[in-house]
Image (cartoon, grey):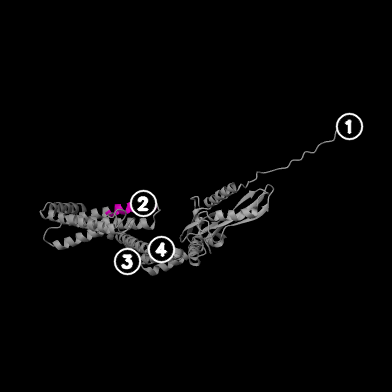
C-alpha cells in the first residue's frame, strides 16, 4: 500500500515537473533564493557577524538565509495561487524547511557547547533526520508512516502511549530546547557585553537565567507532548533523594558556583593560588572554575574547593602586586648615594608603578658584601612577573656598571696553621 502510494506520488511530481508552469515556478524559486542571498549579503556587510547564529561565518551559512528563502518561497506560492500546478514548490519548501532546522540546531549547539565533541554527532544526526524527513514528506510517505506509528500503542499506568506520540514529543521537545538555548545564549551575550568590573555578577545572572529558561522550556515541551506534569512530583522526590546521596558532591559544586559569583570572593581576572596551582581565573561556571597559569597550563577546579579550602587571591581588594629582587655590592660601596639611583632607574622600567614608588633597602650584611633588596609594584601580574623582574635586574646591572660598583664574588679566608719543628 505504501509502496503504491509512493510510486503514484512520484509519478504526479514528475508529471508536474514536465508541465509548462514548472518553469515559472523554477524561476520564482530561483528569484527567492537570489533575493535571500542579496539581502543576507547586505546585512552581513553592515554588521559584525563572525560566528553568529543568524549569519554564521560567511553570511549565507547561518539561519537567516534559509529563513528568508523559505518566507519568500511561501509568499511566492501564495501569490501564484492556482494559476499553475504545484511542482517545484512541493520540492523547494520541504528542502528549505529542512535546511532551516539543520542550520538552527547546528548553530545554536555550536554557540552553547563550543568545545563538546558529542555535539558533532548530534549535528550529523539532526542532518540525517531532517533530510530523511524531507524525502518522506515529498514522496507522501510521512503522513502514512505516522498514521501507522500512531496505531502501535501500549499502556504505562493510566496513560496510553504510541510510537507516533513519542516521536512527536521528542521532536517538539528538541525544538523547544533549541529555541530556549538560543534565547539564553542571546541574553547571556547581552549581559556579558561590556561587563567590566561586574563580569562575575553578570556571569552569575547569565548562568541563573539559562537554568531557569531551560527548566521552563523543558516544562513547556513536556506539557506540549501531553505528559501530566503533576506526575513529576514523584520524580522530583526521587531526584531529591539522589542529590542527598549519590549527587551531593555535584550539587555542592553547583551551589558553590552560585555562592562564589554572588559574594564575589573570587572574580574572573583575579590572580589566585588554589591547592598549590597559581594562575589567573579565566571562567567561572556553575560547576567548576578555570584557572590558567602564566605558562599556559589550565586547571579545572571544582567550585566546592574554592569554598572549603584556602584560596590566595592576589587581586581581591587591589590588583597591584609587590615584587622584589636582591643584589650584593662590595663593603667599600657608598650605598647611601647608590640607593636613590637604583630606585630611580627601577621606576623608569615599563610596567613598574610610580605609586607606590620603588624602594631600596639595606637588608643584610652578607658574608661577601652588602645585600640590597629592591622592591617595586606592578598592576598587571597576569602578563607575567619573570619578564618585569628581568627588566629590573638589567636596569640595576647597567647602573652598577656605569657607577663602577663591583658585585663581589664569594670570598673565603683560609688560615694555614704551621706545625712546630721536631726535636733532634
Crowding at label 3, few (<14), some or many (≥20) Cα neighbours within 10 Å? some
Nearest the viewer among 311 and 340 is: 340
Please tell me how many numbered marks the rendered image carries: 4
As drawn, is 62 to the left or to the right of 197? left
* Residue 192, magenta (yes or no): no
Query: Would you identify the image quadrant in which residue 360 lies?
Result: bottom right
Residue 277 position, x and y percent, is 54, 54
Q: In terms of sequence position, does the residue under pointer 1 or pointer 3 come before the other?
A: 3
Q: In terms of sequence position, does the residue under pointer 4 or pointer 3 come before the other?
A: 4
Return the residue at label 3: 224
Range shown magenta: 118-130
Return the residue at label 2: 120
As drawn, is 414 to the left or to the right of 309? right
Does the image show residue 74? yes
Q: Quadrant of the C terminus?
A: top right
Return the residue at label 4: 192
Nearest the viewer among 6 and 195 is: 195
Amino acid at each position: 500500500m505504501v509502496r503504491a502510494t509512493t510510486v503514484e506520488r512520484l509519478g504526479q511530481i514528475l508529471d508536474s515537473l514536465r508541465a509548462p508552469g514548472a518553469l515559472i515556478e523554477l524561476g520564482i524559486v530561483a528569484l527567492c533564493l537570489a533575493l535571500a542571498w542579496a539581502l543576507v549579503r547586505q546585512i552581513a556587510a553592515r554588521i559584525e557577524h563572525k560566528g553568529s547564529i543568524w549569519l554564521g561565518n560567511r553570511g549565507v551559512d547561518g539561519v537567516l538565509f534559509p529563513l528568508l528563502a523559505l518566507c519568500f518561497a511561501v509568499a511566492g506560492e501564495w501569490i501564484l495561487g492556482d494559476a499553475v500546478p504545484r511542482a517545484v514548490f512541493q520540492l523547494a519548501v520541504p528542502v528549505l524547511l529542512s535546511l532551516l532546522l539543520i542550520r538552527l540546531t547546528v548553530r545554536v549547539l555550536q554557540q552553547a557547547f563550543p568545545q563538546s565533541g558529542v555535539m558533532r554527532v548530534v549535528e550529523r544526526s539532526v542532518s540525517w533526520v531532517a533530510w530523511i524527513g524531507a524525502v518522506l514528506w515529498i514522496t507522501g510517505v510521512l503522513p502514512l508512516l505516522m498514521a501507522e506509528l500512531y496505531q502501535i500503542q501500549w499502556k504505562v499506568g493510566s496513560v496510553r502511549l504510541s510510537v507516533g506520540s513519542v516521536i512527536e514529543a521528542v521532536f517538539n521537545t528538541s525544538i523547544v530546547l533549541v529555541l530556549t538555548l538560543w534565547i539564553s545564549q542571546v541574553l547571556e551575550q547581552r549581559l556579558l557585553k561590556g561587563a567590566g568590573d561586574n563580569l562575575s555578577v553578570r556571569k552569575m545572572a547569565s548562568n541563573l537565567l539559562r537554568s531557569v529558561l531551560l527548566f521552563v522550556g523543558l516544562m513547556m515541551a513536556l506539557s506540549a507532548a501531553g505528559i501530566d506534569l503533576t506526575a513529576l512530583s514523584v520524580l522530583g522526590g526521587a531526584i531529591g533523594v539522589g542529590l542527598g546521596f549519590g549527587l551531593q558532591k555535584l550539587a555542592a559544586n553547583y551551589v558553590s558556583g552560585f555562592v562564589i559569583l554572588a559574594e564575589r570572593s573570587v572574580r574572573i581576572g583575579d590572580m589566585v593560588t588554589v591547592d598549590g596551582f597559581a594562575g589567573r581565573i579565566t571562567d567561572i561556571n556553575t560547576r567548576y572554575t578555570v584557572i590558567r597559569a602564566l605558562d599556559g597550563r589550565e586547571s579545572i577546579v571544582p567550585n566546592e574547593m574554592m569554598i572549603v579550602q584556602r584560596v590566595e587571591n592576589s587581586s581581591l581588594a587591589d590588583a597591584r602586586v609587590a615584587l622584589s629582587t636582591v643584589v650584593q655590592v662590595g663593603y667599600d660601596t657608598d650605598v647611601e648615594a647608590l640607593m636613590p639611583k637604583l630606585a630611580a632607574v627601577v621606576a623608569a622600567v615599563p610596567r613598574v608603578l610610580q605609586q607606590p614608588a620603588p624602594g631600596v633597602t639595606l637588608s643584610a650584611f652578607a658574608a661577601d658584601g652588602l645585600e640590597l633588596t629592591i622592591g617595586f609594584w606592578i598592576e598587571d601580574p597576569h602578563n607575567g612577573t619573570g619578564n618585569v623582574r628581568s627588566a629590573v635586574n638589567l636596569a640595576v646591572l647597567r647602573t652598577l656598571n656605569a657607577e663602577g660598583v663591583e658585585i663581589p664574588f664569594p670570598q673565603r679566608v683560609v688560615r694555614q696553621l704551621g706545625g712546630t719543628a721536631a726535636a733532634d
